[in-house]
């Protein structure tokens, strides 16, 4: 499990860890094909952003494993304001990967565009003790 120096967070759950970040799509998916967006970290530590080969997906790989996930919150700054992110998958205890997908108002997964910025907060458990 995560073995880092964390600052204090008051929570009723034991061993709650919060990872927040801000990533930017610096090369959109239109140039080379679906799922080839390039991501750059603007703010945050403890993770790395990448594409997973699927159009409209943002793969965030955590540096450490955690017991479980309590909450995932995400929003974005995009040229098309009608898009939002939803959680496509999470495996914080195994692969350490959380995948967010970009969704339009009709519920379809749509490609990210250059200069799109995604903000996220993960609330994670680092102990099985409740």
Image: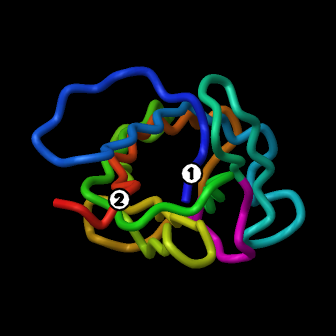
Q: Quadrant of the C terminus?
A: bottom left
Is residue 52 in the magenta section? yes
Q: Which residue is drawn at 50% across and 72% down?
A: 93
Whether 86 is drawn above or below 116: the answer is: below
The answer to whether 95 appears left or right of 52 in the picture is left
**Relative image position of residue 119 (x, y in whole percent):** 46, 34
Q: In which quarter of the image is residue 107?
A: bottom left
**Residue marked by disc 2:** 127
**Relative image position of residue 39 (x, y in whole percent):** 74, 45
Q: Which of 79 and 40 is in front in this view?
A: 40
Badge 2: residue crowd in 10 Å (few <14, some 14–19, many ≥20): some
Q: Do callouts 2 and 1 mark residues in contact (Cβ within 8 Å)?
A: no
Q: Which of 76 and 62 is in front in this view?
A: 62
Chain part drawn in magenta? 50-58
Report the disc number at residue 2.
1
Report the disc number at residue 112.
none
Q: Residue at x 67, y 24 (%)?
A: 42
Secondary structure of residue under mark 1: loop
Furthest-right residue in this view: 32
Q: Earlier in the sequence, mark 2 or mark 1?
A: 1
Q: Distance between the residues labelled 2 and 1?
A: 10 Å
Whether 24 is drawn above or below 125: the answer is: above
**Relative image position of residue 22 (x, y in whole percent):** 56, 31
Furthest-front residue in this view: 129
Secondary structure of residue under mark 2: loop
Is residue 111 in the magenta section? no
The answer to whether 83 appears left or right of 19 in the picture is left
**Relative image position of residue 64 (x, y in whole percent):** 62, 55
The answer to whether 102 appears left or right of 56 in the picture is left
Q: Which of 96 and 55 is in front in this view?
A: 96
Furthest-left residue in this view: 12
Q: Residue at x 62, y 23 (%)?
A: 43
């Amino acid at each position: 499990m995560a073995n880092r120096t964390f600052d204090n967070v008051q929570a009723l759950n034991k061993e709650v860890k919060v990872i927040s970040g801000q990533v930017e799509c610096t090369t959109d998916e239109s140039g080379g094909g679906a799922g080839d967006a390039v991501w750059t970290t603007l703010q945050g530590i403890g993770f790395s952003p990448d594409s997973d080969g699927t159009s409209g997906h943002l793969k965030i790989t955590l540096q450490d494993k955690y017991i479980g996930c309590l909450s995932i919150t995400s929003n974005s700054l995009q040229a098309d304001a009608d898009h939002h992110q939803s959680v496509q998958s999470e495996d914080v205890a195994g692969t350490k990967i959380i995948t967010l997908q970009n969704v339009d108002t009709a519920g379809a997964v749509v490609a990210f565009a250059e200069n799109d910025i995604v903000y996220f907060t993960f609330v994670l458990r680092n102990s099985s003790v409740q």
